[in-house]
Every structure is written in C-alpha cells, then in structure tokens.
Amino acid sequence: MKPMINIALPKGRLGEKAYRIFEQAGYECPSIHEENRKLIFENPEKGVRYFWVKPSDVVIYVERGAADIGIAGRDIIAEYEPSIYELADLGIGKCRMAVACKKDFCDNRDRTLRVATKFPHIARSYYNSISREIDIIKLNGSIELAPILGLSDVIVDIVETGKTLYENDLEPRETVLDISARLVANKVSYKFKNQQIRKMSEDIAVLIANS
C-alpha cells in the first residue's frame, strides 16, 4: 500500500472548491461528504488523507509537517512567510488586498499614516516599499470601522466586490496584493514523498489548464 499523503484543507467555501479539484483530479474521498463530526477522512486506495483546518492554520500544519500538502491563500503565505514550497496557483478564491479609506481622505506625508489591518506584515512591507512612515494598528475584525471612527486613516484588507466598503462610505485606493489559492507542500515531505506529490501536483495542473 502506498504511503498516505496528508492534505490540509481550509474550512469553508474555498476548501470545498479545493476538494472538488482534488476529486476531479482522481483523488476522491467519498467519506468527506458524509454528515458527521469526523475531522479526518481517508481513502487508502487513493493514498490520501484529508482534514479541515482554519484557513490561517493551513501553512502551520504544512510547515510543521503534520500535513504534506495544503491549500492556502496567497495572503496567508505572504503574511506568515512560512518555510514551505508553493507548487501551483489553483486559480480559485481570487480577490485582492487593498488600501481603503474614506472617500474624502487625502494623505498628508508630513505625518505618520495610521493603518488598521489584520495583516501587519503585508501592510508594513507595502509601505516600506513606497517609503511611507506608518503606525500599524492590529485588529482582528470589523476593520472598516477604524477609519469611520477615527481610529485609523486607512485600512489594508481583503476586497472581493468592494460592496462593504462603498456601503460604509469608504473606497479602495491602491492594490497591495492579488490573491488566489495556492497548493503548498512541506519541504521534507516533498523530498521523501516526491513522486506522489509531484504526480498529484501535475494532475491538478492539467485539470486546471483544461477547465
């Protein structure tokens, strides 16, 4: 029997879309569709074991070797900079990270810019690249409130349609990062399970190219 490939899937819509790609590529696991509270699903015949984790935890499971491969958004990879291999862009979960602010905001470069975000590393890297002095305000939710209540001048956050921004009298300005879901691998697993992981990655790449 072939060794199992452990696959970390992000909970939610993105993970469900990602699983469908694996399924269509020939790595199905029927038990994953059953209504139960199980956390791990395997198909020994196909040599795959899937488990659902919080999206931001995927790269931790992969980096630490609890998962051989996983699906992570480019935003999570850029924020945490884990020591992993990026194998493929799945072309799903597309959105962008952008700077947004009140519609009448005008940046005064003579003073420090206050930036509210869930992604301090990405925000800092972006503003360093344009030589802008900033004060990072790390928040965990409802980022849009920060400029409305005067906590920050701008926010750096994920934008899909922009509807939430516009409804709160905010608007996106610069794009910081284009985001999509990536297939990532643990470096040690890639060495010792190279044949299986490469074949899986190639099967998925062919499927995406033809879809």
Image (spheres, rainbow, N blue to C red):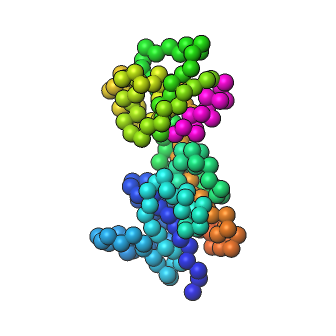
Q: Quadrant of residue 191?
A: bottom right
- Residue at 59% in and 64% down: 64
In percent of width and height, residue 109 lies at 59, 15
Q: Left or right of 15: which side holds 113?
A: right
- Vertical arrangement, residue 60 with respect to residue 134, above or below: below
Magenta stretch: residue 122 in it? Answer: yes
- Vertical arrangement, residue 1 with respect to residue 180, above or below: below
Disc count in the image?
0
- Residue at 29% in and 70% down: 35
Q: In which quadrant is the N terminus drawn?
A: bottom right
Name, please, the residue furthest toward the left. 35
- Vertical arrangement, residue 5 with respect to residue 206, above or below: below
Q: Left or right of 211: which side holds 87?
A: right
Magenta stretch: residue 203 in it? Answer: no
Residue 139 vs residue 193, the one in the foreground: 139
In percent of width and height, residue 22 lies at 50, 65
- Residue at 39% in and 30% down: 144
Q: Quadrant of residue 20?
A: bottom left
Q: Left or right of 100: which side holds 163?
A: left
SS assignment for the magenta stretch, majority: helix
Q: Is residue 20 visible?
A: no
In percent of width and height, residue 74 lies at 56, 47
- Residue at 53% in and 54% down: 72
Q: Is residue 11 visible?
A: yes
In percent of width and height, residue 71 lies at 52, 58
Region of the chain picked out in magenta, as a range: 119-131
Name, please, the residue furthest toward the right. 191
Q: Quadrant of residue 34?
A: bottom left
